[in-house]
Image (cartoon, rainbow, N blue to C red):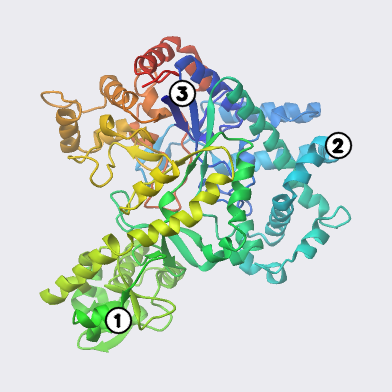
Amino acid sequence: WRGAGVALPVFGLRTAKGMGVGEFADLKLVTDWCNKAGLKMIQLLPVTDTTSHCPTDSRDSYPYSSISVYALHPMYLRLGDIPSLPGDLKTEIEQETRRFNDPNYFREKQWDADLKTDLDRPVDFDEMMKVKIRILRKVFEAIGKQTLDSEGFKQFMLEGAHWLKPYGLFCWIRDFFGTANHEEWGALGAGRVSEEKLEEMTAPTSDFYKGISFYWFTQYQLHLQLKEASEYAATHGVVLKGDLPIGVDHDSVDAWYMPHLFHMDKKTGAPPDDYAEDGQNWGFPTYNWDAMAQDGYSWWSNRLGWMSRYFQAFRIDHILGFFRIWEMPATATGGLLGRFRPSLPITIEELRQNGLESQINRLTNPYIKRHLLERNFGHDWFRIKERFLEDDGYDSFRFKAGLQSEVACKAIVEKEGSPIGYKRPEEIIHGLNQLINNVVLLRDDDRPNDSFYPRIEMWKSSSFQELPGDLQHNLRTLYQSYFYGRQDQYWADTAMKKLPALLDASRMLVCGEDLGMIPACVAGVLEKLVIMGLKIQRMPSPGESDSKFGRPDRYPYMSVCTPSCHDMSTVAGWWEEDQGRRQEFWNTLLQRPGEAPGSCTTEVLDMIVKQHLWSPSCWAVFPLQDLLGMDDRLKSKNPKGDQINWPPNPAHYWRWRSSVSMEDLMKTEDFAARLKKLIMESGRCGGKY
């Protein structure tokens, strides 16, 4: 059996009833379109609450930064569908919906500084959330009591009390202090609210009950609407596929109420790749897997059990994190000072055998020379030296006490401004980060004199480049052993301890996002556990292809194939980025003669979609933007603006919306019929391969 689906963020849907953003109720219209087009799956980005700022703003638009692994985001609630609304609130909701949907809502162009392009009527996250929360509070005042007294809510509360009570209290405290940073909450901070205290503060007799129960009321309404959309999809033969983020926000209810399950002094992210040359730093605390294992990983099984109320399948974001996670110190802002946890380190004995023991301090401390300062900061380099550095002899320097961290240096520059008047603060921060990251080895926290880790891509550092050739050779040998040799069985055993608990927690179909720096053991573990991997044509796995592009006709059955995803440009955007690359793709993968067209024509997208539909992969899932690109009436006029995320910037503003409304898409009967014909011809409409 093989099927086809569409991938989209709920917030990116555009409908006549949505209040400036896609909402759960819109998924019913998506289901109707899927039925017309022969699609069997709707794959979503995470829909959990990310409200860590008070009041919420665009920094909370990042869907993978959950403040609760259970709570749904209030922006997805269709206010007009809440039962028993008073007439005046219905009128206000209708007025605000019309205002947000006015084609002239934005008076100015909406520039995306990361993508360096204008966006087409994107989500106005700040204003949308402000209006929705304002109206929601009025709705709660009007019908909150009768809802809380209803049998439906009581059952919801009974089944979800284990997460609803901490979540409601967390939100109330966040609003009271004006911040979700629980390190600033004093006696109510992380790990300081006992179960007894929680029960006392959330009881109906508590002075805080009304403020807390507002959040329960909101979650109940969200639950009803997502449940309705899920059941509608299932009834119509469409699978709803959720997304399981690998991390939770530092300022989350989970990290606050159960801090023992996390390493709160660490951050997680990803090593450098083609999309983020300095790596990624997501800012999430890493998991304390030893603590989680003590009760059989119940935090995970409970989370997935609740998720299965809405979804029939789920994608494990960054499944490699269950083998090992890229971990940085809390003082890092980038990803270059990370190392894999868990992993088998380089020992002091190995350094000794390779003639490196006497170089340990040289290799583990930032290598700062005068010529490097001149290169980074120009002839006024001494101004940097005066503020941040001190002499270390022989034209060498070291950071002043307390300043050898990216967080500390960034804070100083943001507060005091640039020490060099003609250089922007961003340039100074970047130059300082280069110095901080200019190391070859990282010391282990617990055994700093005995265990070490190679800095990722250490050969790009001047610290490495200015070493004698024999030492460079020995370090490269240790690097190869660390990243591509000694860890494989260890990481396989680690994953086999964790992943089965996730599989046993529900009957959902499991898919893993296994992109990036992939250990050799991953494929075997996923195959053994019957977990589908992800195949993206422009990111082939090691050994998968004889060119720089994946071959869909060679993909394994137990996989999900797709031409792009939210973390990269769409097919049309990618096509127009690099002339040489598209020419190679045109001649080799598409096997077309002559010069490749400069823009991604509907013919090009048609061929790429067909490649994926005819692949052996169990599922072929296409971003909505790529499917719309197959039709001249529907494709974006600005493919660059169709990219959802910009991975190098963890603070990217996620606000993409489809330029085509679902109502207009439903009217293009011929396009849906053409897509369905392609799906049926490829055997993906319920047929066999």
Quarter assignment of residue 131: top right
Which residue is the site of mark 2? Answer: 146
Label 1 close to label 2 by CB (< 8 Å): no
* Residue drawn at 36 percent across, 84 percent down: 449
Q: Position of residue 379 (x, y in %)?
A: 21, 73
**In what quadrant of the picture does the N terminus appear?**
top left
Which sits earlier in the primary sequence, circle 1 or circle 2?
2
Up-down: is 424 above or below 389? Answer: above
Where residue 623 sits, quadrant-wise, is top left
Crowding at mark 2 (Cα within 10 Å: few <14, some 14-19, many 20+): few
User: Can residue 246 be seen here?
Assistant: no
Q: Is residue 506 left or right of residue 534?
A: right
- The amino acid sitting under disc 2 is Gln
In the image, residue 53 lies at what x, y percent?
60, 54
Tell me the number on the disc at residue 507. Answer: none
Question: From the viewer's perspective, is the residue at label 3 or at label 2 nearer?
Answer: 2
* Residue denoted by label 1: 348
Instruction: Please determine whether, in this image, residue 683 is positioned above or below residue 642.
Output: above
Q: Nearer the viewer, residue 520 or 579?
A: 520
In the depicted view, which residue is nearer to us: 346 or 333?
Answer: 346
Q: Nearer the viewer, residue 273 or 475?
A: 475
The extreme right residue here reads 205
Name the mark on residue 660.
3
